[in-house]
Amino acid sequence: MATQKLKKENVEKALKELSGNILQCANRLGCSRKAVYDAVKRYELEPVLEECREEMVDIAENALHNLIRNEHASAIMFYLRTQGKSRGRGYVERQETTGADGEAIKIQSIDTPPRATNIEDWVSTKNRMRELIDDE
């Protein structure tokens, strides 16, 4: 990895050309991802990085809209799940978990004894735990 200081112009150019992808910028500049992040901070390029990332969100949204227009089923379902819920049409997913045959799930808490310090305590603890479990 490069030990020399990155130039502001090179970092800014890489960010713009590579849509703010830090790993790709690091590869192009011959340095680590951390070095790119450090340069972004040092040269106050956060607004440039943010703008690049916002542009990618716009591109992704446009691609999603194109898929929806072409009636791509999973794109339509994704959009309705994430954006359609504001219309109150039930596009919200939920999961309900129940026990066997729809019964409530039984939860049992067992207070565990202190950690055994010798084999006799361990055997005694093991037997007590087995009794508690078998009592169900």
Image (cartoon, rainbow, N blue to C red):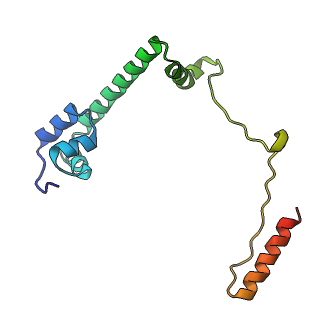
Q: Nearer the viewer, residue 30 or 70?
A: 70
Measuring 14% from the left and 54% from the top, which residue is drawn there? 2
Q: Position of residue 86 (x, y in %)?
A: 58, 20
On the rendered structure, is 21 left or right of 106? Answer: left
Q: Quadrant of the C terminus?
A: bottom right
Q: Position of residue 133 (x, y in %)?
A: 83, 66
On the rendered structure, is 99 left or right of 91? Answer: right
* Above or below, comparing residue 100 to residue 79 in the picture: below
Measuring 23% from the left and 34% from the top, which residue is drawn there? 18
Measuring 67% from the left and 86% from the top, which residue is drawn there? 117
On the rendered structure, is 99 left or right of 24? Answer: right
Q: Position of residue 131 (x, y in %)?
A: 85, 71
Measuring 25% from the left and 47% from the top, which residue is drawn there? 37
Q: Is residue 28 visible?
A: yes
* Above or below, comparing residue 119 to residue 4 in the picture: below
Q: Is residue 44 visible?
A: no
